């Protein structure tokens, strides 16, 4: 299993360099969007929560880039994301959820084929279907953004948001500043948000 917390500083630097090479997109922090604006929290996990995405830092970076490219190609806007070794979360705004989910489904199919070829595991199931939850309010939106960025900390990969390279956390903090980010964290706490979603067997 790929575990950022167990990597040396040199390995972390290599992973960060690899990620930066792809110049991953990120548009802006959200501003008062609601369910009517087409905001959604999307998430998907590897089958049985196996760390298939996290086989290597390179695979994590490649999948992150491919996922964000599919979202952009579908005409959606990414507000935040986090890709972990066995699952991912996206906060997006889209006028065409069905079209976006179809693209993500095809990405899951392509990556399953490629990974099974690489690991000589033809026929192995790699993904659960992508789940979607409509954003209901501004409070729900900010709590979701905090949840997405906090996910690597929640799972013990890093101690601080900005230490996980496969997310939008650092760009978010650069955009709004640590003081405002901390205020949003306190005003829109995660609490029990997502309890059980990422647990094996759920």
Image: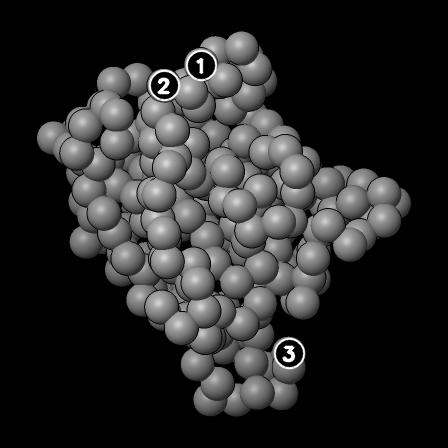
- Give the residue pinned by disc 3: 118
Residue in the image at 80% along x and 52% along y: 7
Q: Quadrant of residue 183?
A: top left
Q: Secondary structure at mark 1?
A: helix
Label 1 to label 3: alpha-carbon separation: 45 Å
- Give the residue pinned by disc 2: 187
Rendered location of residue 79, percent (x, y): 38, 31
Q: Is residue 82 left or right of residue 30?
A: right
Rendered location of residue 144, percent (x, y): 35, 36
Say above or below: 33 vs 201: above
Q: Classify mark 2: residues with Cα within 10 Å, few (<14), some (14-19) or many (20+).
A: few
Rendered location of residue 88, percent (x, y): 46, 53
Do the residues under discs 2 and 1 have CB atoms within 8 angstroms? yes
Say above or below: 84 vs 86: above
Label 3 to label 2: alpha-carbon separation: 45 Å
Mark with earlier residue (3, 2): 3
Quarter that holds the C terminus: bottom left
Quarter that holds the N terminus: bottom right
Tell me if I can see residue 28 in this picture: no
Q: Is residue 12 left or right of residue 83?
A: right
- Give the residue pinned by disc 1: 183
Say above or below: 137 vs 72: above
């Amino acid at each position: 299993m790929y575990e950022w917390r167990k990597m040396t500083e040199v390995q972390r630097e290599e992973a960060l360099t690899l990620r930066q090479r792809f110049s991953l997109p990120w548009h802006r922090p959200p501003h008062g969007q609601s369910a009517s604006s087409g905001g959604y929290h999307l998430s998907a996990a590897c089958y049985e929560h196996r760390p298939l995405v996290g086989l290597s830092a390179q695979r994590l970076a490649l999948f992150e880039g491919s996922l964000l490219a599919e979202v952009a190609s579908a005409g959606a806007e990414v507000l935040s994301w986090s890709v972990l070794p066995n699952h991912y979360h996206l906060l997006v705004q889209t006028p065409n959820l069905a079209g976006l989910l179809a693209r993500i489904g095809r990405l899951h199919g392509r990556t399953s084929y490629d990974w099974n070829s690489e690991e000589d595991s033809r026929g192995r199931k790699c993904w659960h279907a992508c789940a979607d939850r409509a954003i209901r309010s501004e409070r729900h939106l900010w709590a979701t953004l905090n949840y997405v960025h906090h996910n690597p900390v929640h799972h013990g990969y890093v101690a601080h948001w900005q230490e996980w390279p496969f997310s939008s956390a650092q760009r978010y903090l650069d955009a709004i500043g640590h003081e405002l980010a901390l205020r949003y964290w306190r005003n829109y706490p995660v609490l029990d948000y997502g309890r059980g979603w990422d647990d094996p067997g759920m």
